[in-house]
Structures are given as structure tokens and as C-alpha cells.
Amino acid sequence: MMHSVADEDEPRLTGRGIRQSMSQLHTWAGLLLGWILYAMFLTGTVSYFKDELSQWMRPELAYQAQVPDQAAVAQRIADEFSRSIPGSSQWSMKLPDARNNSVYAFWRTGPRTPGSRGGFGEGYFDPATGQKVTARDTLGGDFFYRFHFQFHYMPVVWARWLAGAAAMFMLVAIISGVITHKKIFIDFFTFRWGKGQRSWLDAHNALSVFGLPFHFMITYTGLVTLMALYMPWGERVAFQTAAERQQYAAELSAFIAPGRPAGVGAPLASIEDMVRQAQDRWGRDNAGRVTAVNPGDATARVAVTRGDAGRISMSPQSMEFEGPSGRLLRVRESVGAAAETRGVLYGLHLGRFSDIVTRWLYFLVSFMGTAMVGTGLVMWTVKRRQKLPNPDHPHVGFRAVERLNVAGIAGLSIAMAAFLWANRLLPQSLAGRADWEIHVFFIAWALTLAHAFVRRPKAAWVEQLWAAAAMLALLPVLNAATTSRPLWHSLTQGDWVFVAVDLMCGALAVIHATLAIRTARRQPARKAARKPSSSPAAATASRQEGT
Amino acid sequence: MNVMVDWGRVGRLLLRILAALCGGYVLAALASVAALALPISKPQAVLTGMLASFGVYAGAVIWVFAVRTAGRAWAGLLAAAAPLALVAWMVRP
């Protein structure tokens, strides 16, 4: 690794020099956190359909053909809270909308006393009954979503720093990748099929250049989503008083700080009426979240926030009500310019504003980003294999990268499919069932890593790609066997969430099978590609393209 | 391994990596604090500094690896950091 660093003492032509050092920066920034980036990209891509995946993973909840009246649902759940968690100092519920058929809520389980902030609870509720859902215990699509930026089995803050470091490496890899390519648009229209390293390079270029604005946007906005964690220094210097901090927090979120309860009981006024006012303002299905602080106390406040549809920005918009009287205290619909910019960048990253077409575009371009990272990782080995002193016994670093690629790319597909299999197969009564779905994901992933280290790389690739293809292809079959919502049923019922997940599994299975077949046929092509690369012309060409 | 390790070169590379990872972050942090001097309200200035900081960080990393020597990389970072540090010192409470 060290001997490939540009020699500083050697005089160079400036133009080529910078391109070479950028090429090396691109290679190493891309490789070091490449597997983490790949996993972040793929789980993030899937998360554009997190709500739909969550529906698929809770098959007990009926398909929601029409969004239920949010105002009535909010009242139903609030009544349930006053029964089940009396004395809670705060609760918050996310109302059902076009993409969600359940209500996600979290709450503090007791009054806040000095020295104790009270415990937290969370759960999913059935909009029709107001009761906790009786569906299987699962994290649903939220597992991939959370994994995307905080992984698992590690402290959240460390994990988010790791995700931030990976995003920063990505940003550097994108910029240095662009500088490396002087003929970036010509490269984009060049594709050399079946030429080993050239084909990998062309695929990597095409995937990167086509989605370049998206890749840059998604990386930068990803950093923005957690910027308060990564860059807290301005905030620390600027705000010295609690009032200043509160004013700042109001620019970022619609949450209302719970004041000191008066200790005087007063029931909440009609939540239904409050949500009704929000519906009049923002649209029938476009109330987002209802939050109450000190419910049941004379000091209670209720905030209804605006939903995701109809605008890109995630900056807070809310209506705040006095709890006992139901009187509208204020409407907040604007924040400062920088806060709005942050809201738009945040919104662009999550893509929650998008309609179904935009959402699929997000998914497809993000999928290309995943493939960009994947092809980049594979290219690292393909390129180096030609220069190995003895290709039959590569050095340990090369072998490690080769095998980590198998488990990091093909293995992740298996692990993600295994997670969905576990969702259908784990017994309902299993204690900690939702956690076990996740354990299965990691056990499957660990097995693919072990497999990648005991098998020859090519065999490992082919076997794992076939395994992933089979697991994905059989998911609709498994779904038909274990639920009352098989594909033919969903098709006739117009249950498009189940139709889409089943068909998507089929499409992904085809992609994995295609890759498996191509990899299995690869060997002769790679040998053929090695000979010309030892000719002077090809060697020059490969040098110009960087390391 | 029959590759001769050139320790001088390794050291210079490590200096660059240090400049990129740590120097770049410190520069970005200074920029985010210096943004408080902007003639806008405090919350907006804080957010502006945060939003821009990742661009500063990425730019610093590119600079560190684009220039010809590790010394020049550090010199550039320091030259950019000095005015930012001065502004940051002036906006402190």
C-alpha cells in the first residue's frame, strides 16, 4: 500500500500529478470504509420503501384501501392513552397516512420527578380499534432504516459517528473521483462488455456519472441529518442560556418542551377537534404527529404537526393548542432561511415528500449508487490481480479484501433476505421476537463471512449469489404459505403493497441469478484480459486511468 | 516481503493523513464557529456554519492530497485556519 503513494521527490507534470494523487485518494477513501458504505447505501435504498416493508412485515394488519379519518383515529388513541398510561408526562403519535396502516407512538411512562426523567415506552396501534396491534412483534422496515445510520449492537452515538465518517469518506471519494476523470462524459458513453477490468471500470463510471448529482446530494444531506452531532461547536459557543437554546430548538423541531405540571387535574379537550383544524389547514390526510405534554394536567399543551406530503422541507410546521380548553394558541409555519435550507436538505435525503413515481426514481438511482460502491470494491481486486507477483497466492491484504467483498456484497443480500424469512418463520410466541429477527440477520451475515473465508473467492461469489437469488425468489412462496395474503390474492384485492414486495423479491432474485451466472462464466474472460494488459499499450492506458 | 519500506515516505504519508482527518475537522469546526460573525440571527448563523462545515472539511481533505508535499498541505491548512480562528476568537461569549 505504501509503495503506491505518489513520490513526492519526483518532479511531475502538474496536470497528471493531481489526477494521480486524486485517483489514489479515491481508491483508498473508497476502499477503507467501502463495505460500510455499501451496507449503508443498500439499506438506505430499501428504506425509501420502509413504510411499505413495515406493512408487509405485519401481515395481520389489513391492507388499508383508504386512509382512515385521522381526527377520529387521534381521538381513539388518545382515549386509549388516558386509560393505559395515566400520569404520563408526554406522549406522541404518528397518525396513519397513505403509506402507513398503523399508528406508531411513544411516551414517558410516568411523571417527571426531580432526579428521574421517567421511563419510555413505544408501540404500534391499530387505527380502527385504538388498541395495541396484535400483529407479530417486529421492527419492520425500521430495522434497515436504523441500521442505515446507526448499525446495531453498538452504542448509538459511536455508531452515528462511524456512519458520519463513512459519509465524509464518500464525499471525498466522489469529489476526488470526479477530478480523476478528465474525460468524464466520454467515459460515460463508453462501454466495453466482457473485457474484465475495462468492463468493471466502465460500469463503475457509468453508474457514478449518471447518478452523480444524486450521489453528491445524498451524501451531503446525509451529513446534514446528523450535523448537530458532528459539528456542535457553533451551537456550544452561541447559546449560553436555556431560552436561547429553546428558541434554536424551535427552528428544528415541533416538539414542545414540557413545562412544570401544576398538579391540578384537567382532562384534555377534544383531540379530534384539534386534528380537524389541522386537516382544514393542510389537507385531509396530511396531519403528521400529535404530541401532548402534561396531558391530564391544567398546564397541558397539544401540538399537531403537518405531514410529509405537499412540500419538500422537513422544517417544523405545527399548530399548538391549550390542552384543557382546546384553544388554538399559535400556528408555526415558517423558520429562518438557514433552518429552512436545513429542512429542505433533510427532506431531500429522506425523500418522504415524494409521490410514488418520485419514490421509485429515488429507489432506482440510489440502487445505482449501491452498485457504484459495489463495482468500485470489486474493481479494487480486479485491477490488482493483474499486477500480483503470483496470482495463485496473493498477499494477505488482497485475500482479505477479496473475501470481505463477497460477504459485504453478496452476503448482505443473504442477510437481508434472511431477515424477511425470519419475519415469516419465527414463532409468534417467541420472547424478544423482534430482536431475534435482527439476530437472524447478523447470524446469516456472519455465516456468509465464514463461508467466504473457507471457499475459493469465485466459488464463494457464485454460491452466495445463488443462495441470495433462491432466498429472494422463494419469499413470495413463503409468504403464500405462511400468511393469508398470497400474490394471487393481493392481485385480485388490489393490495398493492403486498403485490409490489412480492414482485420486487422476484426482480431482485433475477438480478442475483444473472450475476451468479455471469460470475460463474467469468474465469476465461479474466484470463484473456490479463494478457493484453501486459502489452505496453494497455499498460499505458491502465496507468492513465489511475490506480 | 522484499519491498524496501521507505520510512521517510511513510512518515510524510501519515502526516498527510493526520492533516486530512484531524486538520480538516478542526478547520471545519473553526469555520462553523466563525460563521457566528455573520450578520444574521444566532440560530441561523449556527445552522449556516454547520451546513457549510462539511464542504470545508471535504475541501481541506482534497487540498491535503492535491498539493505536492506534506509541508505544503499543513501550511495551507494553517493559512486558512488563522483568519477563521481570529474570527472565532472574536465571536466567543
Image (spheres, coloured by chain):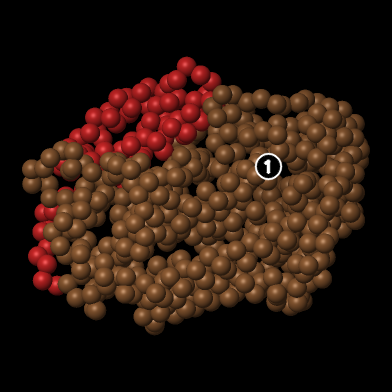
Q: Is residue B52 left or right of residue A493?
A: left
Depth check, front residue: A515 or A70: A515
Q: Residue B89, image x and y in percent?
A: 36, 26
Depth check, front residue: A403 or A461: A461
Q: Is residue A163 left or right of residue A437?
A: left
Residue B73 can be seen in this image: yes
Write the residue at 60% across / 70% down. Answer: A472
Write the residue at 45% across / 24% down. Answer: B36
**Quadrant of the frame with the C terminus of chain A:** bottom left
Q: Residue A183, image x and y in percent?
A: 29, 42
In the orientation shown, which residue stands out farthest toward the top?
Answer: B39
Q: Colour of chain B?
A: red
Chain ID for brown: A
**Quadrant of the frame with the N terminus of chain A:** bottom left
Establish if B67 lies above or below A24.
above
Q: From the image, tell me which residue sits under label 1.
A: A355
Q: Residue A209, image x and y in percent?
A: 41, 45
